[in-house]
Image: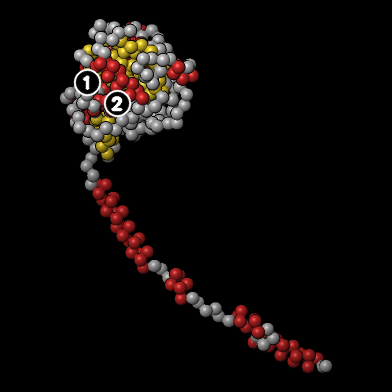
Amino acid sequence: MTGRSMLWVRTVCSLCLMLGLAYPGAAHSASPKKTNKVEVAKSKPSRVKAVVTKERRQSLSATKQRVSKRAPEPSRVAVAKRFSKTESPSVSASSPVRSLVAERATPNRISFGQSAGLQATPDELGLKSNAVMVIDQQTHQVLFDKNASAVLPIASLTKLMTGLVVTDAGLPLDEMITISEEDIDTLKGSGSRLAVGTTLTRGELLHLALMSSENRAAHALGRTFPGGLGRFVDAMNAKSRLIGMSQSRFVDPTGLSPQNQSSAKDLATLASVAYERPVIRDLSVSPSYEVASGNRVVQYHNTNRLVHHPEWEIGLQKTGYISEAGRCLVMQAKIAGRQLIMVFLDSAGKLTRIADAERVRKWMETHPSNLL
């Protein structure tokens, strides 16, 4: 075959390949792919989606306008005047019960009292609290005693001493105090609805500390004490020695540290002394209270549900909880015509300290002359 013939054959083969004659499948693969109508529809911008996006933009714009028109926060002077009118702000007795606000639900752990075997101590009332003290406030007669001298962590019962030190120092209750990052709990990681930057009066912080066991409020009270937090803790321990609490030790104003320790006997003394301060009495049994925090109003409630109970006449109270201390409760109450101080420490369940108080009340009502 001549060179010209070879060139012609190669040219014909190239044309066949280009036209798909030699490889029919190639023509199929090279042919334009039919486009599915559904795929075309998906590729087009959705009108519905565009409409929703537009509505969202309009909604966000309207929200921003509402926020910008929101009433300004109350001035410090206004808040101060609100509290300075009375030592005990008026509250509604019909407020809903929301107990255990500051005492977070945490997994059960063995407390100091349980580790010491105090739960094995029998008593005639079958109380679940591991350390108990009930005394007649007027005669100082001991009506019930169960491990009353055992020294245990006392959790937020510490705030009774905090309130006593603040009150006896004569600091102005209408002075404004701002919650700072120093007041955040880094020991237990407990939460708070008092945001950093919230400014309240000293009286309002004392109210929240005693009624709702607000940890940031209690810490701010100690932090702003003349001389600082260290001086405040020193004052707490000095006050405990002054009133005869020989088995007690305080390391912070909140009670979050398990090193805040005392006995049921000592706490009965503390409750009796604190009861003599009207401001502590009134604030501790207040059913609820509202404070302005930023652009919102925060509602607080008493951590002791018994203050709402019509069968109880309570003059002072404080609850407490950390895992090392168990559930704790201190109360002054009038039962069967007698003024009683009751202390319940290291109770395992959420409601057992309340149930123990009910058992003591019924026992006193049916056996008012009972003594040890």
Residue at point 35%, 66% (across, down): 48
Nearer to the camera, 266 or 260: 266
User: Does any portion of residue 19 appear in the rendered image?
Assistant: yes
Nearer to the camera, 339 or 232: 339
Q: How is the image coloured?
A: secondary structure
- The image quadrant where one finds the N terminus is bottom right
- With 226 as the anchor, is 42 left or right in this view? right
Residue 357 drawn at (x, y percent): 31, 20
Up-down relation of residue 136 to residue 34 (above or below): above
Residue identified by numbered label 1: 313
- The image quadrant where one finds the C terminus is top left
> In the image as oriented, which residue stretches furthest toward the right?
1
- With 299 as the anchor, is 324 left or right in this view? right
Residue at point 28%, 50% (across, down): 64
- Distance in Å between CA atoms under marks 1 and 2: 13 Å
**What is the quadrant of residue 278 in the picture?**
top left
Residue identified by numbered label 2: 304
**Dot 2: element:** loop
The amino acid type, in three-letter code, at marker 2 is Asn
Tell me if mark 2 has few (under 14), some (14-19) or many (20+) residues whose alpha carbon lies within 10 angstroms of its own: many
